[in-house]
Image: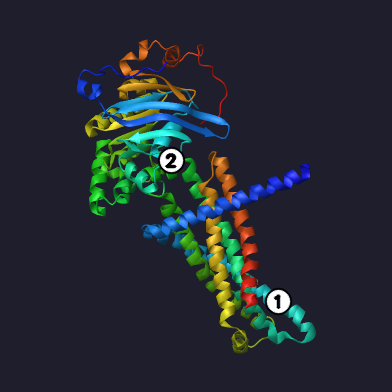
Amino acid sequence: MNFLAAIGRATLALLSTVGAVVLFALGAVVSGLTGRLYWRQLGRQMLEMGYFSLPVVGLTAVFTGMVLALQSYTGFARFEAQDAIPTIVVLSMTRELGPVLAGLMVAGRVGASIAAELGTMRVTEQIDALTTLATDPLRYLVFPRLLAGTIMLPALVLVADVIGVMGGWLVSVYKLGFGPIEYINRTFEHLETQDVVSGLVKAAVFGFLLTLMGCYHGYRSKGGAQGVGAATTRAVVSASILILIANYVVTELFFAR
Amino acid sequence: MPETPTTPILAERPAAAAAAPAKIAIRGLVKSFGRKRVLRGLDLDVPEGRSLVVIGGSGSGKSVLIKSVLGIVTPDAGSIRVDGQELVGASRAELDRARRKFGMLFQGAALFDSLPVLENVAFGLLARRLVDRRTARERAIATLAKVGLGPEAADLYPAELSGGMQKRVGLARAIAAEPEILFFDEPTTGLDPIMADVINELIRGLVSELGATALSITHDMASVRKIAHRVAMLYEGKIIWEGPVERLDDSGNPYVDQFVHGRAEGPIKVGVERNG
């Protein structure tokens, strides 16, 4: 019986958390869409999430592309299929690795900083202060971040796609003996619009999820510095897990078509 | 022993005191956090144009009281009326409208640390769309002057300010939109005695200059004597004494006596409690 009770408690806790997160997200989106949009907040967040994430996302992408080319060469050379390398690199990057790796890197960078910032604002009563100054904290703090994440992550992933393909190109041309033009031609030979679009849709979903986790955990943090630290950890861990789950769900949706 | 505030209080404004309509009327306010019952049926009236200070020990629920009135904490039961308008269970739009009358100075000042001083002070004006950006800037500078800060402070960030300066800026932010009701949460906590007195003087001056109603919470008795017209003592979730500040020393209430004189012995038992 104790075993069953433990399962029941865990299930209830999970469901109530899911409910709280959904209500939080709905509240933020509804209040964001029904009132004024804080353009300055949105601009600041877009700059912070998009532009300042470029180095980390770019580095991740270039090395991922390089490794992809090397690894697929090792495997494909065994049955004389090296010609498929450009296609493998570009499909892996656009459909899968671009969005997932960018999502995880940005979750670590941006999700953590959102949780820490909102968490500090919570424990120093700055969020309460917003309320007393006739400003809805969900509209002012949360919605611009959610929107910025949803817009900027696809943009980052597009850049990551290009840089990743370039990484594959570098290795293939300088190490594996591909012709530079031939590699580019082969890259686009089998690439379809949907490959890129599905990756960008994933990115938008990931961007929303990771900013949501940062906002949710930061907004609800309590208990001083320790609470803010815990919120930051929870934000990054839950965002990473949600990104991996959502990755499968979105892939499945596109795969069925 | 709840005492009904019927006697005229201050000689200079007898009419206001005697017939003062309650600007804020709180009845039967109840709030629990989990199993901890913080407010247990609290009744309190704040007369218009008066400054009422609620005293009480740490964890007695003073902050919960003030945050309930501000609508930051939702009470479990009871009634809070501001100018006769019920706030408990009010819609968001109604709450927003009531909050336009409010100005609040938080314990740690709660300045927005991503914004410079000027934008902190102008925040409420701009959020309520009372004025355009340039006017807001001018009003903010003028408000800063009222709390003794020059325009050179306007471009600093909160992290660059001392505790006393942060409190001044917080005060300026609270009064910038000329609210009808001011709330002060432990206004002197964390300040040295001189700076505390400066803040007390500022509060006293600004409240009477604005003609505002003030509800404060503190456990600093020097501050109480300086800024209060009336004092109420909160103990175990209820107001156990209320009266004019002049009666503080002969309240006839052993709880108030113990608190006012800061004695460890008395009817109030000090245990280890979690802060409400």
* Residue B172: percent from left, percent from top: 30, 39
**What residue does disc 1 label?**
A70
Looking at the image, is mark 2 or mark 1 nearer the viewer?
Answer: 2
Seen at 24% across and 19% down, the residue is B10
Q: What amino acid is at disc 1?
A: Leu
Q: Which image quadrant: the N terminus of chain A?
A: top right
Residue A55's image quarter? bottom right
Q: What amino acid is at disc 2?
A: Ile
A195 to the left or right of B212: right
A127 or B3: nearer the viewer? B3
Q: Is residue A118 above or below residue B275?
A: below
Residue B187 visible at all: no
* Residue B152: percent from left, percent from top: 28, 44
A60 or B22: nearer the viewer? B22
**What residue does disc 2 label?**
B72
Residue A239's image quarter? bottom right
